[in-house]
Image: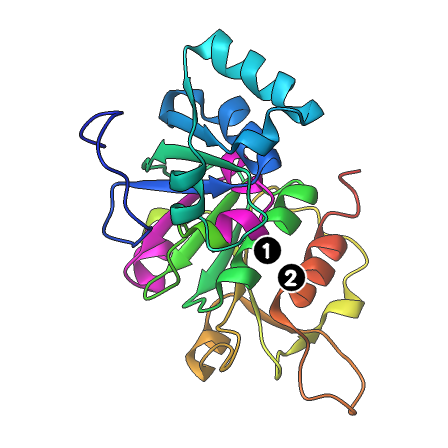
Amino acid sequence: MAENKNQKLKKYNKNLNYSYTFGAFPTIELIKAKPDAVLKVLISTSFVDNPAYLKLSEDCGRLNVEIQVNDKLVNRLSPKDNCYVVGVFEKYVLTLSENESHVVLVNPSNMGNLGTIIRTILGFGINNMAIISPGVDIYDPKVIRASMGAIFNIDFQYFNSFEDYLNCFKHHNIFTFMLDGQCSLQDFDRYDSSLYSLVFGNEASGLESVFQSYGKSIRISHSEKIDSLNLPISIGIALYQFSKNKF
């Protein structure tokens, strides 16, 4: 928990107990979805004339969240010159639902990919994501910005190992996505199980061969002109197939 709302703010590192949203849209999503976590909102003077400022100020006023005009601090905290809004929020701890399906990421290493994946799973109606350590810091502002604030609308939880995850969710059907998966995703016309976990490996190395022994392994067939699909694209394709009957 942050010491207080007036503490001296530092450039982000994973050891801090707070993080940032960079930009108006993710900051508005933060305030809307996690109002109790918001510490303050920083804006630059040039943003006061922006139409989005009225919405932001109304939301902050309703929740008694401080808005501070501080060009120097915005510029110091933000890695980009075109950032005019910074939300400051306390990190929070979540747990996954036993009654909903999950996406499981084993050792994800790319912040931009993780943010894109978060936005993608939310778009397909998956609200729970497990991360098997070691993995990228989900609270890094680069992840938050890439997710366009979608991170504040999902539940996520880190696990020390895949076995730890399995021990917590014994009633989920496991589907591991691998280049040499036993079954082609294209063969899945529909899937009616109420609970499933879709498991994906690291961007560079994928899943180790041991994951063939968990549940059913699936491959996404593609042209031989490429060696593999980008991880966020693979997840989007898989979720489209598994959620066909949802929408």
Does the segment drawn in magenta span residue 155? yes
Relative height, residue 183 to residue 116 (above, below): below
- Mark 2 neighbour density, 10 Å: few (under 14) some (14–19) many (20 or more): many
Q: Secondary structure at mark 2?
A: helix
Q: Secondary structure at mark 1?
A: helix
Q: Disc 1 and disc 2: Cα gap in Å?
A: 7 Å
- Measured from the top left, where is residue 136 in percent x and y? 39, 62
Looking at the image, residue 44 sits to the left or right of residue 186; the answer is left
Give the amino acid type for the residue marked by disc 1 in the picture.
Ile
Looking at the image, residue 113 sits to the left or right of residue 4; the answer is right
Q: Which residues are magenta?
A: 143-166
Residue that protrudes farthest toward the top in the picture: 62
- Measured from the top left, where is residue 121 in percent x and y? 62, 48
Q: Can residue 64 be spotted in the picture?
A: yes
Looking at the image, residue 164 sits to the left or right of residue 73; the answer is left
Relative height, residue 69 to residue 228 (above, below): above
Q: Dividing the picture into quarters, in which one does residue 18 lie?
A: top left
Q: 245 and 39: which one is in front?
A: 39
Q: Residue at x 70, y 58 (%)?
A: 236
Q: Residue at x 18, y 30 (%)?
A: 3
**Residue marked by disc 1:** 117
Give the amino acid type for the residue marked by disc 2 in the picture.
Ile
Quadrant in the picture for the N terminus: top left
- Measured from the top left, where is residue 240 in percent x and y? 75, 54
* For marks 1 and 2 on the same chain, the one whose residue lies earlier in the sequence: 1
Q: 112 and 233: which one is in front?
A: 112
**Residue marked by disc 2:** 235
Dot 1 and dot 2 residues touching (CB under 8 Å): yes
Q: Dividing the picture into quarters, in which one does residue 89 lie?
A: top left
Q: 30 and 130: which one is in front?
A: 30
Residue that protrudes farthest toward the bottom in the picture: 225
Does the segment drawn in magenta span residue 87? no
